Image (cartoon, rainbow, N blue to C red):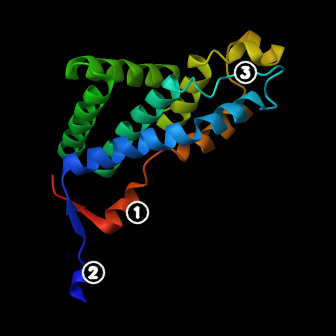
Amino acid sequence: MFNLLRKKKVDEDKIANIVVNSIFDSVDKTFHDVAAMINDDPAFEESPNLSSEDSEYFLFIVICGNINNLYKHFTVEQASKIETKIIEKLSVIFEKEFLQVERYLGKFQSYISSINKPSKNFLYGMSKALFYKYDLNKYQDEYFRKMRTPNPIFLKRMDEVMDRFLWDWGNFSEKYKVSV
């Protein structure tokens, strides 16, 4: 009975595998739905016609959001080790050097933070990054298009979408003990 109450131990390598695999799996399986939602969103005067194959920006936004989230749920040391392992896994997947992937993600995270100022809400920044990376401004009504800012109603809907792609560390922590 006491074995049932004990949490399984997982190290940073196992966590990185789980996170990377789940991100790729969820983006691969659902981006067509995300693209369809954006294409049909009433905030746009005409459909952006995003292709279900055009998931690269979305993938990197989700990766950055999940890396950012690590630092809210783990110590800096633990989060840093997990982030390093995630970047190692991504380096293999993308067949790039570790430093190339690290720099690219760093630039992407900086981009998300910069377009989101003064807000510190990274989720909101993820939605804004999606808006700008997919050049959605030209499909909005004239008022928001001239302001060059996303319709806040669209951003709210995208916040809900983006939130579904963030790892549930609370649930994870109930089942596993991180041994980093």
Q: In this orientation, does residue 179 appear? A: yes
Q: Residues within 10 Å of mark 3 (few under 14, many from 20)?
A: few
Disc 1 and disc 3: Cα gap in Å?
A: 36 Å
Callout 1: SS:
helix
Label 2, label 3: how far apart the Cα atoms are: 50 Å
Which residue is at a point 77% across and 19% down the rendered structure image?
140
Q: Residue at x 73, y 12 (%)?
A: 138
Give the residue type at disc 1: Asn
Residue at (72% x, 21% y) in the render: 49
Q: Provide residue 144's location: percent of width, then percent of height.
A: 76, 18
Along the horizontal axis of the image, is 66 left or right of 43?
A: left
Q: State the residue position of label 2.
A: 5
| Left or right of 32, for residue 65 | left
For disc 1, the neighbor class at 10 Å (few under 14, some 14 to 19, many from 20) is few
Task: Residue 49: give its label.
Answer: 3
> Disc number at residue 171?
1
Q: Earlier in the sequence, mark 2 or mark 3?
A: 2
Does residue 152 show up?
A: no
